[in-house]
Image (cartoon, rainbow, N blue to C red):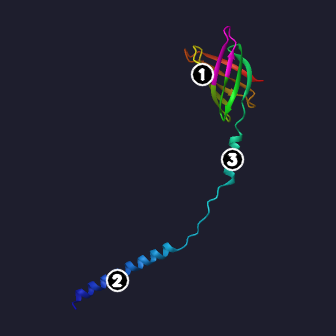
Amino acid sequence: MPESFTYSFKKMFSLIISVFLIVCILFITGCQKKEEKPIQQSPVVADTTKKVINEIPDIKGKYSGIFDNHSTSLNIREQEGIKFKGSITINYRQVINQQISGEFDPKALTFFMTDLLHSRFQGKYSGKFSEDRSKMAGNFTMNLDGSKFSFKLTKK
């Protein structure tokens, strides 16, 4: 046999053996049973979620006070989470009755409301609750001309 043939045969044989060994090693490594850790839900996370839901205070009720130095009453009748609806009555010479919709931030104690019924006196309210949420104070901005009026209300 020629010497080059023997050299090629040896080279080919060692290459086949090397590939075979690599495949066997990969097969054995892949077949080993790996320890699986069960996924556990932390009870602290579930409890925290419940606390956040329970921290949303009930702000429904009747509030009365002044709006631009006129007697005023606000009745929050519906509340779903941080969103609420109700009505406000402002006792000007011509009484203004308006439906409102709003939302509040229980942590910052801030609120924002808008008038729902279209009128020339329609606008937006923004302000802050007292720590115990028994008082609310803020400003009303009229959509028509941007006029601002202050208000202070106390829950009955």
Q: Is residue 93 magenta?
A: yes
Q: Position of residue 147 (x, y in %)?
A: 59, 15
Q: Position of residue 3 (x, y in %)?
A: 23, 89
Report the Cα–Cα distance between label 3 and label 1. 36 Å
Q: Amino acid at mark 1?
A: Leu
Q: Quadrant of the C terminus?
A: top right
Q: Earlier in the sequence, mark 2 or mark 1?
A: 2
Question: Front-most of 94 and 153?
Answer: 94
Which element carries disc 1, helix, strand or loop? loop
Report the Cα–Cα distance between label 2 and label 1. 86 Å
Q: Amino acid at mark 3?
A: Thr
Specify start and end residues of the magenta stretch as a single range.
87-100
Residue wearing tag 3 = 48
Q: Residue at x 68, y 7 (%)?
A: 93
Q: Quadrant of residue 151?
A: top right
59 lies above or below 148: below
Asked if the residues shown at circle 3 and circle 1 are in contact, with their CB atoms under 8 angstroms apart, the answer is no
Residue wearing tag 2 = 14
Residue wearing tag 1 = 116
Q: Amino acid at mark 2?
A: Ser
